[in-house]
Image: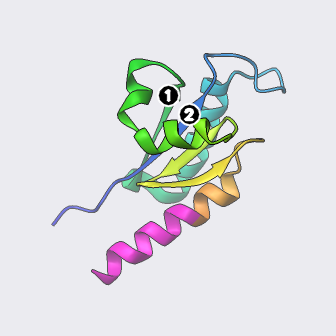
């Protein structure tokens, strides 16, 4: 049986600066590399530009934005784990650990 892959999706504005001289796609790649060193092939990370055709595949994210949520929106698996501010490797890592723990129990 193959191990489950946890999908991490970062929804952000079109490739604009995230405030530290880095674009959102670069910040996503940076955090993704760190998480892959920690969790190996158990995680995949994807940067998705809001209002791109791909973003409309995630109605829960669109609903969060319509309800006043702020970018970036981060999903781990099927759950939104953070909205607004900076990408938090700690918050994302905790959500991944929770998903992996749940997977081991099934």
- Residue at the disc numbered 1: 48
- Magenta residue check for 102: yes
- Of the 4 image quadrants, the one containing the N terminus is bottom left
Q: Please, what secondary structure does the residue beneath circle 2 have?
A: strand
The span from disc 2 to disc 1 (Cα, nearest Å) is 5 Å
Q: Find the magenta span and give its range.
A: 95-106
The answer to whether residue 9 of the structure is visible from this angle is: no
Q: Residues within 10 Å of mark 2 (few under 14, many from 20)?
A: many
Q: Residue at x 58, y 45 (%)?
A: 74
Q: Is residue 13 left or right of residue 61?
A: right
Question: Percent x, y for residue 27?
Answer: 67, 32
Residue at the spot of label 2: 11
Q: Residues within 10 Å of mark 1 (few under 14, many from 20)?
A: many
Q: Is disc 2 in contact with disc 1, using a CB cutoff of under 8 Å? A: yes
Image point 61% across, 16% down: which residue?
A: 14
Q: From this viewpoint, is residue 32 visible?
A: yes
Q: Earlier in the sequence, mark 2 or mark 1?
A: 2
Is 99 situated above or below 58?
below
């Amino acid at each position: 049986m193959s191990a489950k892959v946890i999908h991490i999706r970062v929804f952000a504005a079109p490739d604009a600066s995230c405030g530290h001289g880095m674009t959102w796609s670069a910040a996503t790649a940076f955090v993704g590399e760190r998480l892959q060193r920690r969790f190996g092939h158990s995680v995949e990370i994807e940067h998705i530009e809001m209002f791109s055709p791909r973003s409309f595949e995630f109605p829960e994210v669109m609903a969060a934005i319509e309800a006043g949520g702020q970018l970036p929106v981060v999903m781990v698996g099927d759950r939104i784990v953070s909205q607004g501010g900076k990408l938090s490797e700690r918050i994302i890592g905790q959500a991944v650990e929770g998903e992996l723990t749940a997977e081991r129990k099934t």
